[in-house]
Image (tube, helix red, strand yellow):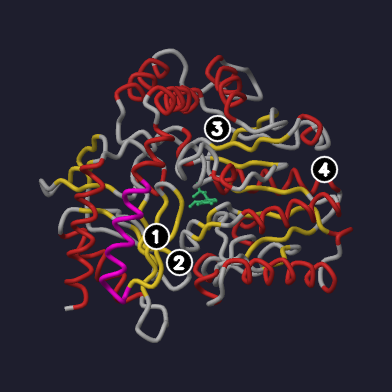
Amino acid sequence: MARLSPILKQATPVTVSHAEGLFVFGEDGRRYLDFTAGIGVTSTGHCHPRVVRAIAEQAGKLIHGQYVTVKHRPLLTLCERLGQVLPGELRSLFFANSGSEAMEAALRLVRQATGRPNVIVFHGGFHGRTVGAASMTTSSPRFRTGYAPLMGGVHIAPFPYAYRYGWDEATTTRFALRELDYLLATVTSPDDTAALVVEPVLGEGGFVPANTAFLDGLRERADRYGFLLVLDEVQTGMGRTGRFWGHEHFGVRPDVLVAAKGLTSGLPLSFIAASEALMSKAPPGSQGGTYGGNAVACAAAIATLDVIADEGLVANAAAKGRRLADGLAGIAADNDVIGDVRGLGLMLGCEFSTRDGEPDPATALRVQQEAIEAGLLLQIGGPWRNVLRMLPALTVSEEDVDDALRIVSHAVKTAQA
Ligand code: PMP
């Protein structure tokens, strides 16, 4: 008998028989409230009927129309639809399958377009597991250990993670930008630097939002030195943060935007968006792939965009996110073990710390396990794996939020007993 490799580390013991909306049903006969959404993927909930119908209909017409061999209608329609939600000049799209693959595509584009070798990433960022993406990932040694030598040309500057530094946001941001300037003065000169690559909210790194002053600072340096600003919106895109794109909270203008996860409600599809002028600087045929822009995945993406618009899911994410954030702040006020509650929209995290301010992964893990036992699926992230992460589907109801808060509140108490 063959079995799943132990290189996969399972976060929960659940084997799913089926799922619907906010709920996952285990083969054990139990029902779980899913506040993981497949790591932010099932944006419209599990198996939304309109997404299921779109997938079934497309599967009967064309499953795979290899996109450098032929074009197909779902791909062209999806381009049009994304044009309605993408910012400014980002009207040129390249499709791939996963977030990592899209980050590789972004890296290739910025190097080819600028002719410069280096990129600057921000500490705690996660951009994927393939070599280029893993080289840009600084959220955990787990993605790098034993994989050396990774790709060269990646330099790391601080992200304004105020809670970790123990400073206020303005002080942390000034520090982060000063260190960026120091890096440019001492390690990677502007002439060698192609791009700044950043998440609007650190995802795997512990749900830490950037801020307007920081991203303005990156934009200003990008303009001054001719860097491209690459926003990795793989996790923050498609309404997750209570705005359609995470960067809209901060008013910053990206040169390249990368998206995946919530785009299709579950099928593998990712893209990078840039201006036509920028994309035209890379040689034609320099990017491609067998499966990119799969027809069924594109149909699922179009249906997902329809559902997000028709059901007002961006506004729902903002409203339910506020309710969840308020509830978590209340739980934190009653429990010293939660040192910080943060995030945007439905991307919320609680950082667990000991009384003397040290990371407390043991308590975070106990809370997660207690919650699962009580029927709530949650994930853990952060550099010390001490951040409980909540990212339910954008269709989450008030009742679901309140149920989750009740379970978390009880789990936090039990975990300290
Ligand atoms: N970028 C970000 C911000 C992500 O959160 C992830 C996945 N967690 C990736 C890139 C990589 O995506 P994938 O796992 O689809 O390769």
- Which SS class for mark 1? strand
Q: Residues within 10 Å of mark 4 (few under 14, many from 20)?
A: some
Q: Nearer the viewer, residue 272 or 241?
A: 241
The residue at which mark 3 appears reads as 291
Q: Amino acid at mark 3?
A: Tyr
> Mainly helix, strand or loop, the magenta region?
helix
The residue at which mark 4 appears reads as 113
**Dots 2, 1 in contact, CB < 8 A:** yes
The residue at which mark 1 appears reads as 349
Residue 253 vertical position relative to residue 407 in the rendered view, above or below: above
Horizontal and vertical percent position of residue 333: 30, 69
Q: Is residue 302 magenta?
A: no
The residue at which mark 2 appears reads as 382
- Which SS class for mark 3? loop
Task: Residue at 59%, 60% (x, y): give it.
Answer: 134
Residue 315 vertical position relative to residue 134 in the rendered view, above or below: above
Q: Nearer the viewer, mark 4 or mark 3?
A: 4
Task: Residue at 43%, 35% (x, y): give it.
Answer: 314
Horizontal and vertical percent position of residue 329: 33, 62
Q: Earlier in the sequence, mark 1 or mark 3?
A: 3
